[in-house]
Amino acid sequence: MKHLFVLIVLIVSSCDSYDNSEKIKIGSEKTEFLEIKNFPNNLKAKNIILLVGDGLALNHITLSRIAAGGLDHRLYIDQLPYHGTSLTHSFENVYTDSAAAATTWATGHKTKTKYLSLDPKKEKLKTIIEMLENKGYVSGIVATSSVVHATPAAFYAHSDDRYDYKNISNQLIDSSINIALGGGLKFFDINKIEYTHHVITNKDSLDYKLDHSKKIIGLFDDDGIERSAENPTQRQMTNFALEHLDSKKCSGFFLMSEGSQIDWAGHDNDAVAMIEEFKDFDLTIKDMIEFVNKNKETLLIITSDHETGGLQILKQDGEYVTIQWGTGRHTSIPVGVQAYGPGAELFQGLMDNTEIHHKMLDVIDYKSLNNQTCGNKE
């Protein structure tokens, strides 16, 4: 009877599987190769750009590559000279969410899911932006989600509830962040924050030089930014934020930019939407590579908080590949780390996501930086 019960369980389990497959056409774009320079291993960076593909792992990149130009195509992310792998688990849990994962980059510590820059005992953890403010750095965040969403929030907010958006929005306004661009208009009182921030709500404002005497907040949709001709892309927002920060001429800058909705497409098991979101992300990478080439003092890092969707590429059928999603949730599959610029050689091999925080500080030689405000020593 015991063996019969096991057999029945196995039969039921196999019947519970489902076919969630679809076909994606193989693309035919030609690879655009970028100039990739060599940087001496002993060269210290001045600035840091951290690009985050939320929910992005090697499987999503592979499908995006095939959909763009075929099996031998090369994306901009593929051309980065240093590639590593990051583990993503949260505090005592194989699973992570964006809040716990982003907290590792911001603070170098593991924490519980839904926590933003608090340790598991709810003690505040100092973020890299807060640390660098005391060294004369300016900072910015960009997201295609709302600016109070988990990933950007971990760099300026401290909360045990990533969904406490009102509290998080107040912490953003009170933070040292010089420019924040994304969605989330409904979480802010515009009349109130105009006293402290230059507020922009339409894409056309990104074409103009803005008053630098105030901090800048761009809120281009009520919540996440709906992809349309009227709304800015990650690429446009990131370039605007970068130009603003670089013009400050301070000790350096830290910029985090997230392609947030790659993750949302993974949750929805929508491969077409995921590929479209990744295109914007990859074009952002292209522009950042070109900035590093010109600036020569900036470290560029690309990574992800976790994999979303359990995407599988199963087989080729003529001009199409068959793909299948395994879940609508996050998985514990490790994610990639790519780097370029001074110090990029540190981001090779297998690393914990907490190590990314410490490596960023090492690259700018944080321990040797003097305390100062932007442009003035204390």
Image: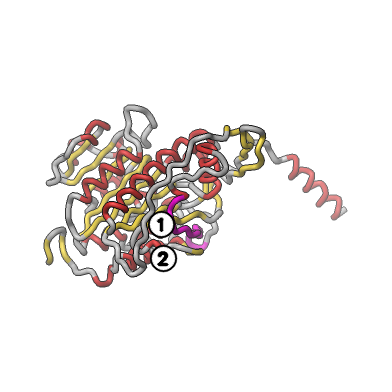
Residue depicted at x 32% and y 45%: 142
> Magenta span has 376?
no
Residue depicted at x 38% and y 55%: 301
Left of 109 or right of it: where is 318? right
> Magenta span has 86?
yes
Colour basis: secondary structure
How far across and how far down the image is residue 302, in percent? 41, 53
Which amino acid, mark 1? Ala
| Contact, mark 1 vs mark 2 (Cβ under 8 Å) | yes
Residue depicted at x 22% and y 34%: 207
Number of dots carrying numbers: 2
Which amino acid, mark 2? Leu
Q: Residues within 10 Å of mark 2 (few under 14, many from 20)?
A: some
| Start-end of magenta stretch | 79-92
Q: Residue furthest right?
A: 1
For residue 339, which numbered disc appears in the image?
1
For residue 346, which numbered disc appears in the image?
2
Left of 61 or right of it: where is 8? right
Q: In the rendered view, tell whether residue 12 sits above or below residue 102.
A: above
How far across and how far down the image is residue 87, in percent? 51, 60
- Using the rendered image of the protein, determine whether residue 229 is visible from the camera's viewpoint: yes
Q: Nearer the viewer, residue 100 or 374?
A: 374
Q: Earlier in the sequence, mark 1 or mark 2?
A: 1
Q: Nearer the viewer, residue 173 or 132?
A: 132
Q: In the rendered view, tell whether residue 54 sits above or below residue 118.
A: above
Q: In the rendered image, which quarter contains the C terminus?
A: bottom left
- Using the rendered image of the protein, determine whether residue 123 is visible from the camera's viewpoint: no
Q: Nearer the viewer, residue 175 or 258?
A: 258
